[in-house]
Amino acid sequence: MNTMITTRQFADHVWNEIVQSLKVPDIRTLSSAVVDDKMWYTVKLSMPAQDWVRCQPREHWHELESRSYVETGCFDASEQLYTALKLKYEE
C-alpha cells in the first residue's frame, strides 16, 4: 500500500489550511451599550449574516452607514437579535 502523497495533494492541503486561517467570522462584536435601559450591540457581520438580519423585524436592528470598505457590514443589534445571531452563526 502506497502512503505517499503527491505534490498536488500536499499543495491542496496547504491551500486549504491557508483559506481556513483567513476565514472571516460570521459575527464579530465591536462594542455594546445600554440605550433606553436596553442592551444593544454593534457587530460586524458576514454577507450571509447581513442578509439574515435584514429579514428580521426592523425594531431590532439598525444598519450603520459605511464610509469605507472596512466599515461595511456593521449593525446595531438589540439584545434579542444579538443572542439569535450568536446562536445561529457562532461555531
Image: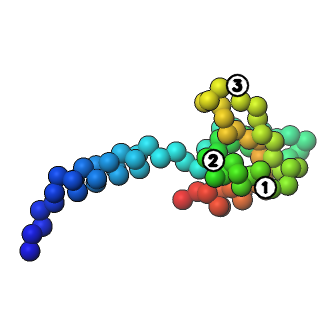
Q: Which of marks 3 and 2 is nearer the N terminus?
A: 2
Instruction: Measure the C-alpha gap from mark 1 to mark 3.
Output: 23 Å
| Residue at mark 3 to residue at mark 2: CA–CA distance | 17 Å
Left or right of residue 37, residue 32 in this image = left
Point out which mark residue 6 bears. Answer: none
In the picture, residue 67 is in which quadrant? top right
* For marks 2 and 1 on the same chain, the one whose residue lies earlier in the sequence: 2
Residues marked 1 and 3 touching at CB (< 8 Å): no
> Viewer-proximal residue, 79 or 59?
59
Alpha carbon separation for disc pair 2 and 1: 13 Å
Say which residue label 1 marks.
Answer: 55
Residue 39: tell me if it is visible. no
Q: What residue type is labelled 2?
A: Met
- At a point 86% along the width and 40% down the height, the residue shown is 35
- The residue where tag 3 is placed is 67
Residue designated by label 2: 47
| Image location (x, y in percent) of residue 4 | 11, 62
